[in-house]
């Protein structure tokens, strides 16, 4: 039994050892398998990374090749465009030269033909006149002979001729005196250059009535009129604060008229072309007054008559039922300091006449003076001014608005009734058949122009846009693009600087 138990124990130990050895073997194999798998996995990973790198490199190479091809194509395209533009330019040049030559040749032929015709006509006329002169002289000779032989006929002829001359002279002088009288009583004074009042009371009655009927005959007309009266300062671009002040003044003037209170006189000063005249006109329109404009420079040449003319204006202003806004442009030309050495005696008297007529607050006349040199005005004149308003040069924001405004007027042919726009429209109408095409002219280009035109007045900006319009009409296709626009702006800017330089060298005082 002992032996059996020992053997069984040995057998158990042996099994245990064998099981341990087997488990160890299996662990070892498992570890080996894991290591192999890891190695395989890493190898696979490396392989994949290499593959990805290779693919990336290949796509970069492909992209570079594509870009190179595209650039090559673009360069070729550019070259072709350039060549085509060159060819087109050359064709236009040759065509223009051929046309000019054709025209010159045609003109020469026409001139030759005209000269021949003229010579023939002159010869014909000369012969006709010679024949007529010969006939007339032979008749006169006959008449003289009869007159000299017949004494009574001679006396009658001399008496008749003298009476005829006296009649003609008397009639002419009489008509002149009568016309001057009527003119003085009823007509517009000669110093007034522009006025909303009719030149004569009876003139324009028919036209005004017809216009009113036309305006009110349709609902649209009435609405347009109402809108027009309600609208703000029309086509005038001003600094918002200045605009508000002007609107307030127009309203105040209008209310003054309603309440029959005395008017307040105004002084507008600032650099030339900043809208003083436009604003005066607009104030008159908005406040419902009549408007008359005169220029200070017109007074000096009148000499001793100036005083009478100034009184004439104030007498004439009484004819207005609405009240008159009398605008004196370039006021410094005749309202300058009375003890100034340049002032003539006649001018001094004219100034005194104006001072006399404006001594009290008036209920008939609002005096609006505009000047570039407010400092030159006589102190008595400045004392009579109730409001002094400065018109500065436009800022960048206003220049932008002005550029847009005049662009609309001159290039698109829309606009108001202002004289400037009328001029623009007239030139547009002349070229009615050619319509301006505006290409890629964005707001940023206009903003850049507004930035560059620092120091420009409203008038200069209007002129700049008129130059753009002229340049567009100078092109055969009438196209305005940003290139042409920038070119004109640059040209005008350099012209402006040149002008300022010349003015500074000449010692001209400038306000602005
Ligand atoms: N603020 C503005 N808004 C619109 N247009 C303007 C403005 N200022 C000037 N202009 C343009 O300039 C032109 C001249 O303006 P205006 O006669 O009113 O100037 P001004 O100040 O009276 O000049 P001046 O002192 O030389 O008489 C106008 O017809 C208009 O085209």
Image (cartoon, rainbow, N blue to C red):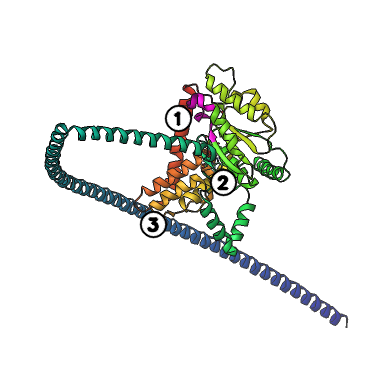
Using the image as rendered, state which of residue 338 and residue 435 is in the foreground.
338
Q: Quadrant of ligand 1?
A: top right
**What label sits on residue 69 in the rendered view?**
3
Give the left or right position of residue 280, taking residue 302 as reference: right
* Stretch of the chain drawn in magenta: 294-306
Q: Are marks 1 and 2 in contact (CB under 8 Å)?
A: no
Say if residue 444 shows up in the picture.
no
Residue 254: percent from the left, percent from the top?
68, 45
Q: Say whether disc 1 or disc 2 marks the residue closer to the N-terminus.
A: 2
Q: Which residue is mark 1?
A: 498
63 relative to 352, above or below: below
- Calculate the distance from the C-alpha at mark 1 to the C-alpha at mark 3: 50 Å
Using the image as rendered, state which of residue 121 and residue 182 is in the foreground.
182
**What label sits on residue 401 in the rendered view?**
2
Say if residue 204 shows up in the picture.
yes
Closer to the eye: label 1 or 3 = 1
156 relative to 59, above or below: above
* Point 59% across, 61% down: residue: 216
Residue 32: percent from the left, percent from the top?
65, 67
Label 1: few (<14), some or many (≥20) within 10 Å?
few
Q: Quadrant of the N terminus?
A: bottom right
* Point 60% across, 60% down: residue: 222
Asked if residue 62 lies in the magenta stretch, the reply is no
């Amino acid at each position: 039994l002992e032996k059996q138990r020992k053997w069984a124990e040995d057998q158990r130990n042996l099994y245990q050892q064998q099981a341990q050895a087997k488990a160890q073997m299996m662990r070892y194999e498992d570890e080996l398998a894991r290591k192999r798998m890891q190695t395989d996995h890493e190898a696979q990973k490396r392989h994949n990374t290499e593959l990805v790198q290779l693919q990336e490199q290949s796509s970069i190479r492909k992209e570079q090749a594509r870009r190179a091809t595209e650039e090559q194509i673009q360069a070729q395209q550019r070259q072709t465009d350039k060549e085509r533009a060159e060819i087109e330019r050359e064709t236009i040049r040759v065509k223009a030269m051929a046309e000019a030559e054709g025209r010159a040749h045609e003109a020469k032929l026409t001139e030759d033909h005209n000269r021949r015709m003229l010579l023939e006509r002159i010869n014909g006329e000369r012969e006709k006149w010679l024949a007529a002169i010969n006939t007339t002289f032979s008749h006169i000779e006959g008449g003289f002979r009869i007159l000299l032989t017949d004494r009574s006929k001679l006396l009658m002829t001399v008496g008749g001729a003298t009476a005829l001359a006296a009649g003609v002279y008397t009639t002419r002088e009489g008509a002149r005196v009568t016309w001057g009288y009527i003119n003085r009583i009823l007509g517009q004074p000669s110093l007034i250059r522009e006025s909303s009042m009719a030149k004569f009371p009876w003139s324009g009655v028919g036209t005004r009535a017809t216009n009113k009927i036309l305006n009110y005959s349709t609902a649209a007309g009435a609405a347009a009129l109402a809108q027009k009266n309600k609208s703000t300062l029309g086509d005038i671009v001003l600094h918002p604060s200045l605009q508000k002040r002007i609107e307030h003044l127009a309203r105040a003037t209008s209310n003054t008229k309603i309440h029959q209170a005395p008017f307040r006189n105004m002084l507008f000063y600032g650099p030339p072309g900043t809208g003083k005249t436009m604003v005066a006109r607009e104030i008159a329109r908005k406040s419902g007054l009549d408007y008359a404009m005169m220029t200070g420079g017109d007074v000096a040449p009148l000499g001793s008559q100036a005083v009478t003319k100034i009184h004439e204006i104030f007498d004439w202003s009484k004819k207005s039922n609405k009240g008159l806004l009398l605008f004196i442009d370039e006021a410094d030309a005749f309202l300058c300091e009375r003890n100034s050495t340049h002032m003539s005696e006649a001018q001094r008297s004219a100034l005194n006449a104006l001072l006399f007529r404006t001594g009290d607050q008036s209920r008939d006349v609002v005096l609006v003076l505009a000047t570039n040199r407010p400092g030159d005005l006589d102190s008595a004149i400045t004392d009579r001014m109730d409001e002094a308003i400065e018109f500065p040069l436009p800022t960048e924001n206003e220049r932008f608005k002005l550029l847009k405004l005049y662009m609309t007027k001159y290039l698109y042919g829309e606009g108001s009734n202002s004289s400037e726009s009328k001029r623009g429209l007239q030139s547009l109408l002349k070229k009615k058949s050619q319509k301006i095409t505006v290409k890629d002219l964005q707001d940023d280009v206009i903003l850049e122009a507004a930035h560059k035109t620092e120091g420009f007045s409203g008038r200069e900006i209007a002129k700049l846009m008129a130059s753009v319009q002229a340049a567009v009409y100078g092109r055969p296709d009438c196209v305005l693009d940003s290139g042409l626009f920038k070119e004109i702006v640059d040209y005008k800017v350099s012209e402006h600087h040149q002008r300022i330089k010349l003015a500074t060298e000449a010692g001209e005082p400038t306000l602005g």
